[in-house]
Amino acid sequence: MYKNANGISPVLACVLTLIAACLTFWLFSGGHMVWGTIFAIICVDFLADFILSLKKSDSL
């Protein structure tokens, strides 16, 4: 299993990104703008981890 510098696999990074994106959409659609913004920032961080993990594993 491939790991990058922070020890997260590409599959786990992808799953975390999708979960954070779903929670972000759910929070914004429910009218929770503050928590939606917080989860949007978390989602962008997970997306960056996903991209970096793909680059470290030579999949991209």
Image: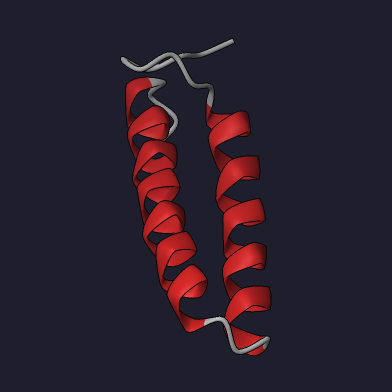
Residue 8: x and y in percent read 49, 21
Kindly identify the residue that appears in the image at 42 percent across and 53 percent down: 42
Q: Is residue 1 above or below residue 60?
A: above
Residue 54 to residue 21: above or below: above
Which picture quadrant has residue 38? bottom left
Occupied quadrant, residue 60: top left
In the depicted view, which residue is nearer to us: 18 or 23?
A: 23
Residue 11 is situated, as x and y percent measured from the top left of the image, at 62, 31
Question: In terms of depth relative to the viewer, which is nearer, 23 or 48?
Answer: 23
Which residue lies at the image location 54% right of the left edge and 36% below the top edge? Answer: 13
Is the residue 45 above or below the residue 11 in the image?
below
Horizontal arrangement in the rendering, residue 7 relative to residue 20 (left or right): left
Q: Residue at x 34, y 45 (%)?
A: 48
What residue lies at 41% left-to-right and 20% top-to-bottom?
57
Residue 49 locus on image (x, y percent):
38, 37
Q: Position of residue 16 (x, y in %)?
A: 60, 43
